[in-house]
Image: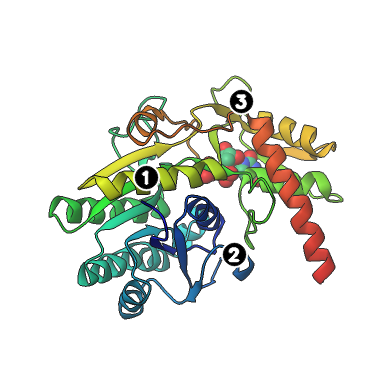
Amino acid sequence: MSQGMNILVTGGAGYIGSHACVALAEQGYVPVTLDNLATGHEWAVQWGPLERGDVRDGDFVAELLVKHRIEAVLHFAALSLVAQSVTEPVRYYDNNVAGTLALMAAMKRCGVRKLVFSSTCAVYGVPPALPIVEDMPTQPINPYGRTKLAAENAILSAASAGDLDAVILRYFNAAGADAELRIGEAHVHESHLIPLAIRAARSDGEMLKIFGTDYATPDGTCLRDYVHVTDLADAHVAALNFILKEKRGHRFNLGSGRPASVREVLLAVEKATGRRVPAEEAPRRPGDPMSLFAANDLASSRLGWRPRHLDIEGIVLSAADWDQKYAASQRASA
Ligand code: UDP
């Protein structure tokens, strides 16, 4: 059924979007990337054409939908830095909410009904219980999470009105890289624990800050659910296959379901790199919930998705392998 079906991937030059393009191509779909390359990379688009432009440009999106005979859209294009969203909320609402609305309007205009939307566990805020299930209250605690929730709500309202059929995927902490190291995480502004810890281990004197060591967790540091990016990519293909048959709106958590603490991540980085992670204890980072991890039973039962990378050491090793390759390529081109 997927043979040759053209799928628009907004943000396909980004970290998760580019891995989704690999998974789509492996299943016989043709990913057509739409990316403004603000944070994505041209080198990450290897499995289909790249259309350079902005998702907020509804006329351009409509043109692409027609030109490429698009049958469904995977929508990743967004800004995703929590701290930046606090200082630049208008930019975040514009990219993440107005961008989604422009895309939905273009889809409606062109009769494209099927959408898979990239959302986040940040929509939950501080959860009332763990693990997090999809029908828990959504009370995001930062503008990034609020923009994603606003986009989710617009999509679900449009789905209820019969305008489109959509799957919303709420990711936990994406990590790791393509098994063949063709693509991986390469953010200019890196704020995530795993790449920063790997960088600190391999640097001379860069110190990793451990944000908070007094949480009520077994080792005092925050718990997160790290999920491998190729597992996320597979979930997008599963969601696409699902929504091609189903109607209306659906939400799923995508997490490994296994919490790991900051200190456990650092140990895994030390094992993967064979080097010590120079680290210092620092105050809690404002806005960090103590523990976040997913119940992924719904994605498992409805999408047939099961993450294959379950242990933090394997996930970190994949990230460290990519980092080594990417850092070498950066040095070579410097
Ligand atoms: N963290 C840390 N030092 C860093 C970056 C992150 O201790 O330099 C912690 C952070 O407080 C959180 C966890 O690592 O508990 C994961 O943070 P990250 O920014 O990777 O993802 P988030 O869960 O915030 O989306």
Q: Is residue 283 visible?
A: no
Which residue is labeled 3 in the image? 220
Q: Which amino acid does label 1 sit on?
A: Ala
Q: Is 141 drawn above or below residue 50 in the view shown? A: above
Residue 178 rendering spot, x and y as whole percentages:
63, 48
Q: Which numbered disc flags the more N-terminal residue, 3 or 1?
A: 3
Q: Residue at x 23, y 46 (%)?
A: 249
Q: Position of residue 148 (x, y in %)?
A: 36, 53
Q: Residues within 10 Å of mark 3 (few under 14, many from 20)?
A: some
The residue sitting at 29% across, 54% down in the picture is 150
Farthest residue, direction top: 218
* Distance from the alpha carbon under mark 2 to that under mark 3: 42 Å
Residue corresponding to mark 2 = 46
Camera-side residue: 75 or 125? 75
- Relative to 329, say whether 208 is above or below: above
Q: Mark 1 points at which residue?
A: 239
Q: What amino acid is at disc 2?
A: Gln
Mark nearest the camera among 2 and 3 is: 2
Image depth: mark 3 or mark 1 in front: 1
